[in-house]
Amino acid sequence: MNWRQRLDTRLRVLVLQTLLFSDMEKTEVAISEVMVGFNCICWDSCMARVATGAAVGGAVGGAVGAVYGTYEAIRYKVPGLLKIRHIGQTTLGSAAVFGLFLGAGSLIHCGKSY
């Protein structure tokens, strides 16, 4: 397919003529169905972005929380098996906060196009 075939405008004119001479009610219904379909696609894409942001935030937060919890447990000389509990609590708390904020940030920026 060469560049002249791709730039052929006859198809566009045919579509416009079809919309012009067709039944107006059916055309409006078809256009509204297409717009609803586009809205669903955008919404699904937005929710995927939010879920991805929350997952990445949880992973980063968990890693940071594990490192910080280990440092804190050693620094404050937490005894015995309480170290593991302290590290786990710090990891989960940090993962939850990072995930929440990154998911919220993704939701805020969802409708913006750059």
Image: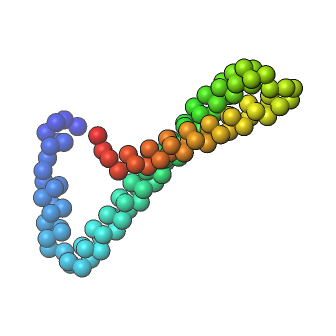
Looking at the image, which residue is at 65% across and 26% down? Answer: 68
Q: Image quadrant for the N terminus?
A: top left
| Front-lying residue, 43 or 103 | 103
Count of all numbered marks drawn on residues in the image: 0
Give residue 84's position: percent from left, percent from top: 80, 30
- Looking at the rendering, which quadrant does residue 88 occupy? top right
Q: Image quadrant for the C terminus?
A: top left
Give residue 100's position: percent from left, percent from top: 54, 45
Looking at the image, which residue is at 38% across and 46% down? Answer: 109
Residue 55 vertical placement versus 17 (above, below): above
| Front-lying residue, 70 or 77 | 77
Rendered image coloring scheme: rainbow
Looking at the image, which residue is at 74% across and 23% down? Answer: 76
Q: Is residue 14 left or right of residue 42?
A: left
Q: Is residue 97 left or right of residue 21?
A: right
Q: Is residue 62 left or right of residue 88?
A: left
| Front-lying residue, 53 or 90 | 90
- Looking at the rendering, which quadrant does residue 28 occupy? bottom left
Give residue 57's position: percent from left, percent from top: 55, 37
Residue 86 vertical placement versus 105 (above, below): above
Looking at the image, which residue is at 16% across and 56% down? Answer: 12
| Front-lying residue, 109 or 21 | 109
Query: Which residue occupies the extreme right position in the image?
Result: 80
- The answer to whether residue 55 shows anywhere in this view is no
- The answer to whether residue 57 shows anywhere in this view is yes
